[in-house]
Image (cartoon, rainbow, N blue to C red):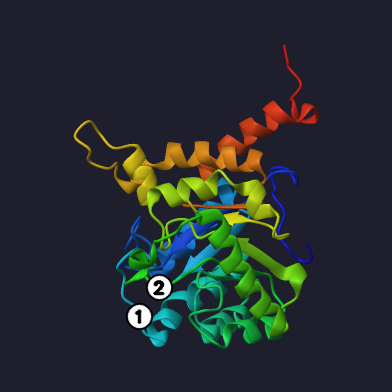
Amino acid sequence: MAGLPVSRIDPRLPVVWGVLNVTPDSFSDGGRFAATDTALEQGVLLVEYGADVVDVGGESTRPGAERVSIETELERVLPVVSGLVDQGVTVSIDTMRADVAREAVRCGASIVNDVSGGRADAEMHSTVAELDVPYVLMHWRAHSSSMQERAVYDDPVAEVCREIEKQVSAALASGVDRERIIVDPGIGFAKEADHNWHLLRSMEALATMGFPILVGASRKRFLGALLADTDGVPRDADGRDVATAVLSAQLANAGAWGLRVHDVLSTVDALKVLKAMTFTDSQPEETS
């Protein structure tokens, strides 16, 4: 696909996207990287750990989150985007706003990651077409404040595919290059745990849409529920990285194009093990 990043581990393996939330209220690391200098240090570290792309977001999309103003979002992301690009980092801008996407690309971002798939901003598709950059189009039904009210499905896989295809058609009609589109099934967005697992087990069905698939399941609540203690208390977000890495390897085997994760190092380690187990030309020579 034209202009899409490739894994540094092996082009046969998924691209690793490192999450960099420059927000005070992210579900996973809220506030840790809100300061520009701290965010820049973290972004560079993610690349050192093996991230192919650093995904910079200035608006939390955790369940129940309220929207921030466009001015606040711009103030948060633009210095981080430009600072990382100056250091040679491939940056994706995680935004639902066309104006933020435009300004971030002007500052050097090379990918637009829109969790709303163009539904939150009527100008997004035409803006992405004008910018001519890769575009992540995610399955989305509503803003975070009310999205879990929309987590109702008879057939999660079929419905998610159908709704993504509808948004893809809208993007194409606005001039977005088909070769630039990446789709994301929206794990955790207007979905309960069983919906997430259905989708994660269905990479082959999702692939029939004909687009690279980016999956963002890292540290999400359904993993916390899976890892709950004997009293049923979900595992904290920062205790879900091993499960995320295992899932990353499984998704790589299932054909995912990209993996959006918080703890890059553990996922990169998992992919290196997968490479050694899968590809005979990847075995290191033994030394005596």
Query: From mark 1 to mark 2, how far is it between C-alphas?
Result: 7 Å
Which image quadrant: the C terminus?
A: top right
Report the side of 70 relative to 201 (left or right). Answer: left
Q: Which of 37 and 75 is in front in this view?
A: 75
| Residue 2's disc number | none
Q: Do the residues labelled 1 and 2 touch (CB within 8 Å)?
A: yes
Q: Position of residue 58 (x, y in %)?
A: 42, 72
Residue 97 horizontal side relative to residue 238, left or right: right
Q: Where is residue 178 in the image (x, y as percent from the top left)?
A: 75, 71
Count of numbered marks: 2
Q: Residue at x 39, y 62 (%)?
A: 151
Q: In the image as oriented, which residue stretches furthest toward the front?
A: 154
- Residue of label 2: 59
The kind of secondary structure element at disc 2 is: loop
Compared to 59, does 5 lie above or below? Answer: above
* Residue position marked by numbered label 1 in the rendering: 68
State the image coordinates of residue 138 (x, y, percent, origin top left).
55, 66
Name the residue nearer the viewer: 285 or 98: 98
Tag 1: residue type?
Answer: Val
